[in-house]
Image: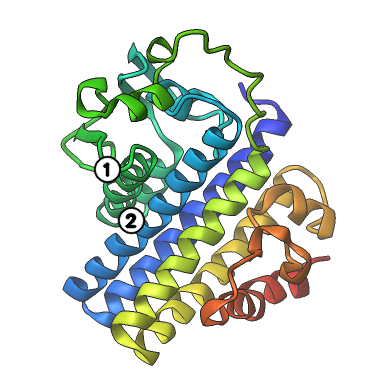
Amino acid sequence: MYNYGDIKLQNKQDAFSAMYMYVSGSILDLCGRRTGEGICREAMRRAGRESGCAQREKFLAANIKTNLQTLFYCARDYVPDPRFRGVEIFNEEERQIYEVHTCPMADFWNKYHCGKLGSFFCEEYHYARLLAFTNNVGQFCSSNTLTCPRDNFCHLSAFYREANLTEEEAKKSFAHCDPGYQPPEPPADVSFGDGIGHLTISVYYYLLEVAEETCGTEGISAVAEGLKQWSAQAISALQLQADHTLLPMDAEFVNKNFALSTDSSSDSLWTGRTGHKARELMQSLVLDSIIQAER
């Protein structure tokens, strides 16, 4: 049984899943499935690389060792929502192997028969993130995935071997390679809201960037059509969520249950996202519509 606080997190998580589904689905529909899949996969690689590089730089600046234990468990830039359930098989600096038995993203995408779209995110984002974090030395494998109709769990394996590093690289990554090392107090995980907000903006931004690079105005139009579809779904979902909790769908409710702030101009998560008029497009096609629907 989840408490009301958990439900708000779930609503934010589902908003991200819906954004990805509608925007990537529109890209495939309007740019062609082969070209569209290439756009989505490259966008997920860019988003994953951005996350992995940022995490690595944050750890190096804080004198935290850059191994798989810290990547998966220390100062995380994204905190899973309460519906994620899994089993940890190996939790080591050089090896992380685990199974995911319930995943709200896979559940959402499968519900709408979009598991294939979801697989682009799962296959590309996490692999690119690991490669960026390990300077292209790490390895990542997903041998089972919940987005595949044949599987009922995800089996994920990540490796980062000391043997593949120089002495200096190993010293930065593993405490036993740095005699006298005293681990500092690690920074806290980001809040759930900031984590899911950043993920939503990052994935959307790179979908738009790669769509424009690949297909020009046709690619921008495909993303715009996906945003319009997401806007309609988001308003319907927020209204239903508000009704179920006997609350008005007002600005406070939206802030607590939607993945993005409706005032993008003052949202620090958009800092640096100045290209492609991405923020303006999101504001005009999604966020302004939600504001108008508030009551």
What secondary structure is marked by label 2? Answer: helix
Asked whether the viewer can see residue 218, the reply is yes
Q: How many marks?
A: 2
21 lies above or below 102: below
Foreground pick, 20 / 229: 20
Q: Position of residue 15 (x, y in %)?
A: 56, 54
Check disc 2: other Cα within 10 Å, few if <14, some if 14-19, many if 20+: many
- Report the Cα–Cα distance between label 1 and label 2: 13 Å
Q: Quadrant of residue 81?
A: top right
54 lies above or below 2: below
284 lies above or below 135: below
Q: Quadrant of residue 13?
A: top right
Quadrant assignment for the N terminus: top right
Q: Earlier in the sequence, mark 1 or mark 2?
A: 2
Q: Position of residue 31 (x, y in %)?
A: 27, 81
Asked whether the viewer can see residue 30, the reply is no
Q: Which residue is mark 1?
A: 136
